[in-house]
Amino acid sequence: MKNLRDVWSSRFMHYISEVQKYMQFIFTGHIAIVLVFLVGAGGYQYSEWLKIVESDFPAEGLIALIIGVLLAFSRPTTLLREPDQVYLLPLESKMSLYLKKALAWTFWSQVWIVAIVYIISIPLLKAVTELTTTNIWLLFLLVIALKYVSVQGEFSYRYSERGHFVWVDRLIRAIIFGVTVYMGLQMQLILAFVAAIIGCIYVLVFRKKCANEPVPYEHFVKLEQNRMMSFYRFANYFTDVPHLRGSIRRRAWLDWFYNFIPYQKGNAQKYLVFRTFIRTDDHFYLWLRLTAISAIIAAFVDIPFVTWFIAGALSFATTIQLKQALLASGEFRMDMLYPLPEGARKVAVMQVVRLTMIAQAIIVTLCGVTQPMFYVTAIIIFVVSEITAKVSKP
């Protein structure tokens, strides 16, 4: 490598190829169909709601709040690796070349989220405010500029403070930028300008503190590892990620669930599998995430066919992934020492998966109780999960 720009280019190309390798498994045909239904149903619901929205709806405050939060979350992507803590130390005085490239990618990889949310809010702004098209698009440019400032701000804070109490920094930036956007939407341009200047001064304070601080390699390396691990865990829901390291949490607040399994010899495997599901992040958050998505769709989409289709697709995904995950434990387990029947674990996995899907059906049905024919959703979830659990291969 001739210089740090080449180092960044090499790592960036490796990072892009790594992401593309797993994205092809994530965005498969059936996921694309689900996304099309989600976008279509969401767009239809949004357009129908705009026809009846009240003129006094607090659109400015809601949009400012959402945009402010999105602007505040600007975690830097540095692509630093653990050996860099040693091998890049001699080049620390030239690290600004590398970090500029990293911050540029951070901005362009995150700004589209804020831009999409703002563009989606434009029909609402036109429906309940007196903003002109010119005003709306000028505010769009302001939001883009604030995102750039926020990216620089979070990086400078993490650089100078080593990431300690970063939530305080994010809260302050969310408030400042949220107020800036709100004043802009209210056409209080002077107040919006003052709030923006305050935000820039706040960022410059930490940027000046960075001048006398060494590069916090350890913090940025840990941040990068956590970011990539989150991506690998998400990708693991769709395909096997060989180098993924799962994490276990106590979750003492869910201990009372274990009381549903009677204390007797025949339930040993069932207790173990259920405890594995509760304590393993990958299993538990998989069920929680897909259940939450299905519940939100059931609560806000009043098109029964769309709700049934998505609920069925997500129940299929939840069942097959939970079953395979709970059966695919290749490590040594304490239950191997006990004289239990050979197929006891498979039976226990089926029982636990059935319990989780019954819970999912109940939650989704309760969330959609105000929708027409809401009870059909529970039937679809239960039927699809039962067929999937019995037909799918271990």
Image: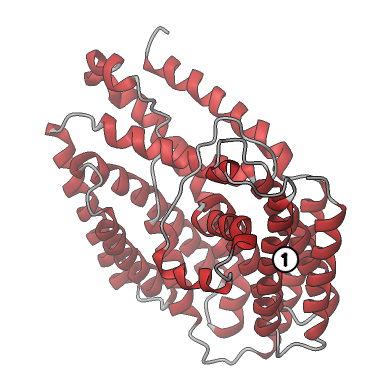
The answer to whether any part of residue 152 appears in the image is: yes
What count of labels does the image hold? 1
Q: Which residue lies furthest to the top in this view?
A: 2
For disc 1, the marked residue is: 354
Report whether residue 50 is seen. no
Mark 1 residue element: helix
Left/right placement of residue 251 relative to residue 200 reads right
Residue type, numbered disc 1: Arg
| Residue drawn 45% across the image and 68% down it | 255
> 388 and 61: which one is in front?
388
Q: Tell me: 249 left or right of 27.
A: left
The image position of residue 90, as x and y in percent, is: 23, 13
Q: In which quarter of the image is residue 286?
A: bottom right
> Is residue 10 placed above or below 374 in the rendered structure?
above
Which of 58 and 158 lies nearest the eye of the viewer? 158
Residue 56 horizontal/vertical position (percent): 52, 92
Question: Could you tell me residue 295's position as x and y percent?
Answer: 66, 74
Work out which quarter of the rendered image holds the C terminus and state it: top right
Residue 85 falls left or right of residue 353 = left
Query: Splitting the image into 4 quarters, where does residue 318 fall?
Result: bottom right
In the foreground, 77 or 140: 77
Side of 288 where 174 appears, left or right: left
99 lies above or below 205 = above
Tell me where residue 173 appears, x and y as whole percent. 30, 60
Question: Which residue reaches farthest front?
Answer: 339
Looking at the image, which residue is at 62% across and 41% down? 329
**Vertically, is 319 above or below 214?**
below
Q: Which residue corresponds to the image point at 43% horizontal and 17% vertical from the top-left?
A: 7
Q: Which quarter of the rendering shows the N terminus? A: top left
